[in-house]
Image: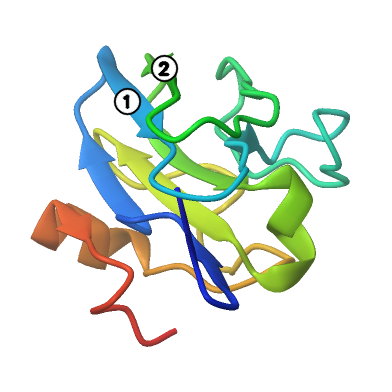
Amino acid sequence: MVTEGSDYYFDPIGLFVESGRTVTFKIDSGSHSATAYKEGTGQASVTRIPKGAKTWDSGILSEQGATFEHTFKTTGTYDYFCTPHKSLDMVGRIVVGEPGGPAEGSMPPDGDVPESQTIVDQGAVSYSSFSG
């Protein structure tokens, strides 16, 4: 999770993992959260994680190097955002196992992320290489 001048972003912006893997979100700079698009979680007004998947909200982390972990067990596509920078397009996508669920076929309401199949094919999509 990065603040660089007036840019706020997750890097990588797209990540592929197998079911059961734990992802660590780490503050590189700035104050950020990693919050699932699950209606009622944080500021989410829509659900963009697979049905039955566990939601998450790291809360705002501000200490450089601070981390938050979440284990992804349900297969599908997960979109997430940073609570303080949601309106500035700070969003990301994780594909677990294979694409699927309500996030497929569209972009999050607060920014663009790589297509799920691109994430699967590449394993990870860096923010600097994404031209959404």
**Against 60, is 46 above or below?**
below
Image quarter of residue 77: top left
The image position of residue 93, as x and y in percent, is 44, 51
The image position of residue 105, as x and y in percent, is 52, 66
Q: Is residue 106 left or right of residue 122?
A: right
Residue plotted at (80% across, 28% down) = 41
**Residue type, label 1:** Val
**Residue type, label 2:** Glu
Residue plotted at (56% across, 50% down) = 30
Spatial CA distance of label 2 from label 1 is 6 Å
Q: Is residue 50 left or right of residue 76?
A: right
Q: Is residue 50 left or right of residue 117?
A: right
Q: Secondary structure at mark 2?
A: strand
Q: Which residue is mark 2?
A: 69
Nearest the viewer among 102 and 40 is 40
Image quarter of residue 67: top left
Q: Secondary structure at mark 1?
A: strand
The image position of residue 58, as x and y in percent, is 61, 23
Disc 2 vs disc 1: Cβ atoms closer than 8 Å? yes
Nearest the viewer among 90 and 56 is 90
Q: Which residue is mark 1?
A: 23
The image position of residue 19, as x and y in percent, is 26, 20
Image quarter of residue 80: top right
Badge 2 crowding class, 10 Å Cα cut-off, few under 14, some 14 to 19, many 20 or more, is few
Residue plotted at (69% across, 41% down) = 37
Badge 1 crowding class, 10 Å Cα cut-off, few under 14, some 14 to 19, many 20 or more, is some
